[in-house]
Structure formats: structure tokens, C-alpha cells
Image: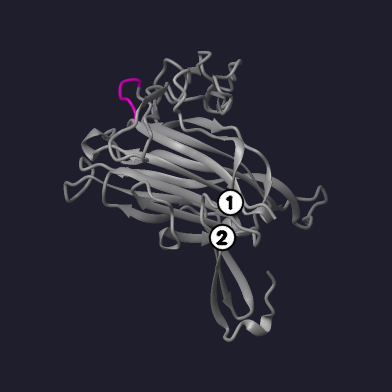
Amino acid sequence: MFFSWKHLLSRHCLALFAGTTILFVGGQANAQVLPGTGTRIDGAWDDFEDESWEYITNLPKSSTNVDKDTRYPLGQSSNGVWTESAKRGQPDVVQRVPTPEGGLPGSKSSLLLKSLHTGVPGQGSRGSNQDDLIMSGSMVSVAYSPSIITRVYLPPFEEWEDKTGTSFGFRAAVKAPMKSSSRSRRRFFRSSPSTKIETIYLGMFIQFNSKTDSPNGEDSAMFVVRADSSGQDFIGPEIKQTGWWTLGMSFTPDGRTHYYAKPGVGPLTQADRFASHYPYGTQIQSFHTAFFNVCNQDNGRTWSTEWIIDDPAMYYISR
């Protein structure tokens, strides 16, 4: 169906088509696509219901980011959907478990992620580290409005690792043109900024604020999001309740990234979008994959918070 611009009776009109809201402001269309809209990408989803599902760890895991040691072969799930990060290694526990109460209707199984050694296997360090579990993806141009959605179970605050800092991440790998400037070999001169297509990593982190460090003596949590137009992380919604949450990101043809979060397991709505940005001041060209971070203080003694995910899936809208 085609519409003439003459049908737009004002400068501010709202239209809803197949999960896409288009807001016309001053003649420009800015669209947000609800995560989970369209066609699910084959091989880029998992519901963990297959009783034969298992994760083959192929230990010891990689820790290239810490000691430059990439230990092949990488860990991988039996269904080929999940793989270990060659850079940071996989969570120490990747295990299919019964779905906690309040999960998606009909869901019997979900995936538990937790870690003790997020740095070098079997060793502690003086700082925080993270493990990554990467989802099998597929390059999708933003012309097809790709999106990613997942459910995440947040345990009661008293069960979280007792530290203030990042505990979990729901991330996306995308490609976009990035500007860089290099110094010319000639003295007193600089070359013009150059642009090249680079992979950038966006997403939503969950930060825990432990009552041990809090002046009011209360535990709390919030989302920290990467990234705004200047490339900085910014504060997202406060987490006022634990239990199941639904998180999503979508990438629209105008090159923007849209962030969504809500308590519960219901479908995301426009009201659940809390931010939209041209991350790093650039326009996203393509979406490639999603992954999850599990973080802890990597002291060799304290386990991370136990994170449970369910039904992560990637989507696109066919044209």
C-alpha cells in the first residue's frame, strides 16, 4: 500500500505498520522497530527445550585479553548456536536448567551462566573481568531492520555477588563507518581524518550497587548502556524489581540503535523504549551477532551472580 505525502495532514503524524512506529517530525521519518518484529533468523535463536542440549567446554578456556593465550578448540553448544569467545573465554558454567517461576508460558528449560575465574583459568587477578558467550549470527543490513530480544532472570538482590559494578551484559556486534585521523610522516602536518568500516560493540549492562558500599545501606541495580552519540556509556532505567525481564535492541534503516527493557516476559511495546542513539556519532550499517557478558571481581574465591537467560532470538523484516 502506498501513501501520498498529501495524506499527512500535519507535521506530526503517527503511523503503525507491522510493529514499526514512524514519527514524522518536520518532514523527516524516524522509525523504531520493536525487537522481535518480523521473521526469526534460522540458526540464530534458542529456547533450550531440547533435552539433548549440552555445552562442550573444551577446557581450558581462552583468556587472550589478559595473557594473549587463545586456547583452541573453543567451547561450543551441541546445536551450534553458541560458542566461546576467543578473546575472553566462556562462562565457567553454561548449563541448561529448569525455567524459574514466572518465565515464558510453556518454557520448561532456560540457560544458566556463571563464572568464578573470568580472567586466566584457575587464577585470580586484582580486578574485575568478564566472560562472553556468543550467539551464532548472520550479517543483516539495517535496511531490513534487524533486532534482538531475550528474557533474563534477575535473582533477588541478596543472591548477587556482593560488589558494586557491572555484573551482566546483553550485547550486539554491529558494523559502522568510524572516523580516525593519523599523523602524517611529514613534520608539522596532519593527514585528513579517514573513515573505515569497523565492528563496534553496543548493548545494555546491568550494574549492581551493593549495600556494602551504599550510604543508605540498600542494594540497588540499574542499566548502563553503550553508547550515546559521543561514544559514552549512559545511565538507563533503574531496576526496581527482580525476577524476569525482557530486553531488546533494534537497528533501523536510519542507522540508529533503539534500546528497550521491561519487567516480565511479555512482548515489548513502544512504551518500553528508553533510548535511541546514533552510537559513537555514526550510522549503523549492519548487524552481525549478539552475545552475553558475565562479570565478577575475579579474585579466585567469589562466584559471579547466577544469570539465567531464555529464548534469545534475532529477527529481520523482509522487504
Residue 125: give x, y in percent of width and height.
40, 24
Residue that carries the numbered disc 2 in the rendered image: 18
Position of the C terminus, as image quadrant, is bottom right
Q: Quadrant of residue 190?
A: bottom right
Up-down: is 55 above or below 48?
Answer: above
Q: Which residue is mark 1?
A: 38
Secondary structure state at the residue bearing disc 1: loop
| Segment tinted magenta in the rendering | 300-304
Dot 1 amino acid type = Gly
The mark found on residue 249 in the picture is none
* Residue 215 appears anywhere in the view: yes
Tell me if 129 is positioned left or right of 315 in this view. Answer: left
Indicate yes or no whether the magenta region holds residue 135: no
Front residue of 202/26: it is 26
Q: Classify mark 2: residues with Cα within 10 Å, few (<14), some (14-19) or many (20+).
A: few
Outermost residue toward the left in this view: 217
Q: Amino acid at mark 2?
A: Ala
Question: Are there few (<14), some (14-19), or many (20+) residues within 10 Å of tag 1?
Answer: many
Q: Are marks 1 and 2 in contact (CB under 8 Å)?
A: yes
Residue 186 screen position, x and y as percent: 83, 51
Determine if residue 229 is in view. Answer: no
* Quarter of the view holding residue 200: top right
* Front one among 317 and 70: 317
Residue 208, placed above or below residue 273: above
In this view of the protein, which residue sits in the foreground, 184 or 208? 208
**On screen, residue 58 above or below 217:** above
Residue at image x 50%, y 16%? 57
Q: How many marks?
A: 2
